[in-house]
Image: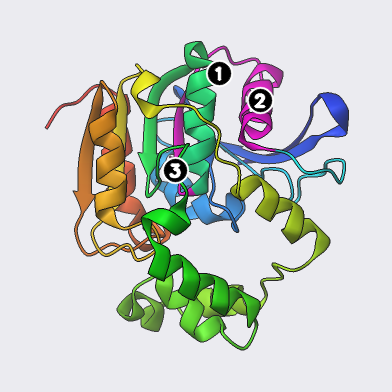
Amino acid sequence: MSERRVELAGGVTLACSISGTGPALLLMHGAEADRRMFDGLRAQLSDTFTVIAYDQRECGETEAPPQPVGLESLAQDARDLLSALGLARAHVFGSSFGGRIAQALAHLHPACIDGLVLGSTWALPDRLDRLNPQGMAAIQRLRAQLPDSAEELVEWFLPAPYLAAHPQYRELFRNARPQSERGLRRAHAVADHPALASSAIALRTLVLAGEIDRVVPAPVTLGLAETMPDARAVLLEGVGHATVLQDPARVAREIRNFCLGARP
């Protein structure tokens, strides 16, 4: 695996991890994560793809000017990263908020996407607090009470049986600092809702929904697929919101089959 720091225009330096050989696959992480959330998935896919996982602005080891940005700027970062790596096109997988960046990229630069995979996400113009009002109210309350609320908050993202076998994720939430200056700038990006209709995305798309997702309920993600002209939806049974952590092998299988053209 190669660890890279890629300089873009405007003083942005993206930290990324690149592994494997084959067609390029760009991974976009969720709102409060970083590229390390894909470590398990990369291990599953590096025998088939050149897998590129990177930290978005205000996340992980990426450095950028301390200014608020929206989804379109984050999508442009992704396009500029591919260009800086000498890639004209790539398959793209975005998870949760990363799925929203992937949608924005599909609107702005469709020619750079070979296959689009969206996991546990929702349509760009929609607000999650309206699609899942009770869930978002509970999550915001728990975030404001961190680190004391970490034990309860993490169970919104991963099922309790999985957490019992992987207690390290409870510690990850205890270390979260959403009220830092960096965290507040990130929240600004997460709150962006550009008026870009999913029905205008003509790319062949795979949509993955976790059956027991409490953050972005499965009907919300499946509903996104119904609005897209060339989308196929898959429901991941027994899986919560953090699909790539809970079942990377299943997610990898779906991505591989879809991107390489296999049909069920």
**Residue 85, horizontal then vertical, whole percent:** 67, 21
Answer with the quarter of the image where residue 82 lies: top right
Dot 2 amino acid type: Gln
C-alpha distance separating marks 2 and 1: 8 Å
Secondary structure category for the residue under label 2 = helix
User: Of helix, strand and loop, which one carries label 1?
Assistant: helix
Q: Secondary structure at mark 3?
A: loop
The residue nearer to you, when weighing 132 against 222, is 132
Look at the numbered discs 1 and 3 and tell me whether their residues touch, using CB distance below 8 Å. no
Position of 92 with respect to 238 (left or right) is right
Tell me if residue 198 comes above or below residue 247 in the rendering: above
Magenta stretch in the rendered image: 70-96
Q: How many marks?
A: 3
Q: Which residue is mark 1?
A: 108
At a point 53% along the width and 55% down the height, the residue shown is 37
Q: Earlier in the sequence, mark 2 or mark 1?
A: 2
The residue type indicated by label 3 comes to: Asp
In the picture, the quarter occupied by the N terminus is: top right
Q: Are marks 2 and 1 in contact (CB under 8 Å)?
A: yes
Q: Residue at x 44, y 22 (%)?
A: 23
**Quadrant, the C terminus:** top left
